[in-house]
Image: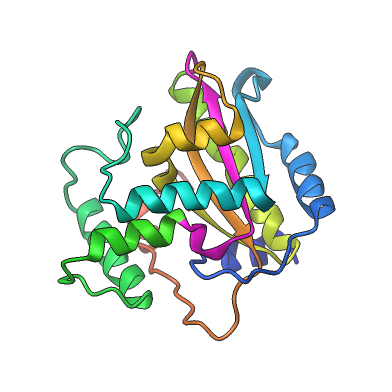
Amino acid sequence: MDVYEAVDSRRAVRAFSDKPVPREILGRVLAAATRAPSSGNLQPWHVYVVTGEPLAELKRRATARALAGDPGDEREYPMYPAELTSPYADRFSAAAAQRYQALGIERDDPDRPAKIAALNSQAFGAPVVLFCYLDRTMGPGQWADAGMHLQTVLLLLRAEGLHSCPQVMWTMYRRTVGKIVGAGDRLVLFCGVAVGFEKEDVPRLRTGRAAVTETVSFIGT
């Protein structure tokens, strides 16, 4: 699979099979991803790979919190700006409608928040979740570096025939995650990434993208 195919076929999968992911594949992907760029070569990411019983326990604890209506831990960074304006708010709304309709959750369902939280806390059935942390002394540049590292991981996973789903939702349960992975107070959770093989015979969603003319300007000849 070349890089263009990996980019084109990458999407956030929200239905994973329980087929185990070989550890050697995860090791190969994460070793190759060390080549991701970072300013000053700081390589500021700290990644925890959680599988097996520790992941099952994390899912149990997070799901119990979700179903109990727990609003989650206080956020350590905003997921979105307080005021989203057009075109960003429009893109967000359209993607959310497509995403949860594909999961069979209607927008006017009064139990929608709890159902969404429960699906997320199960990592959509994924047998592996990667948790990416940064030292809390790091700044915006290093957060950008961590994003480039994770994108490299996602593309390498596709090259191995695997799928993924980045989940910022896990920051809502960061204290629960921290207890399972043993992350110290000096680290802040950036996000989780569900990893696995896609479940067969489920609807496959590809959310739309803005035209390149909306986001790219060519200057010069």
> As rendered, which of 196 and 55 lies closer to the eye?
55
Q: Left of 72 or right of it: where is 148?
A: right
Membership of 128 in magenta stretch: yes
In the rendered image, residue 52, in percent from the top left (x then y), is placed at 68, 52
> As rendered, which of 113 and 197 lies closer to the eye?
113
Q: Is residue 32 above or below residue 42?
A: below
In the rendered image, residue 34, in percent from the top left (x then y), is placed at 74, 35
In the rendered image, residue 113, in percent from the top left (x then y), is placed at 25, 59
Magenta region = 122-138
Q: Left of 203 or right of it: where is 162?
A: right
Total marks placed: 0
- Residue at 57 percent of width and 40 percent of height: 131
Scheme by which the image is coloured: rainbow
> As rendered, which of 202 and 37 lies closer to the eye?
202
- In the picture as drawn, the residue positioned furthest to the bottom comes out as 201
Q: Left of 137 or right of it: where is 55?
A: right
- Residue at 68 percent of width and 21 percent of height: 41
- Residue at 41 percent of width and 62 percent of height: 119
Q: Is residue 170 above or below residue 175?
A: below
Membership of 46 in magenta stretch: no
Residue 58 seen in this snapshot: yes
Q: Where on the picture, by quarter, is residue 212?
A: bottom left
Q: Is residue 5 above or below residue 147?
A: below
- Residue at 65 percent of width and 25 percent of height: 43
Which quadrant holds the N terminus?
bottom right
In the rendered image, residue 151, in percent from the top left (x then y), is placed at 58, 47
Q: Left of 93 or right of it: where is 66?
A: right
Residue 12 seen in this snapshot: no
- In the picture as drawn, the residue positioned furthest to the top comes out as 137
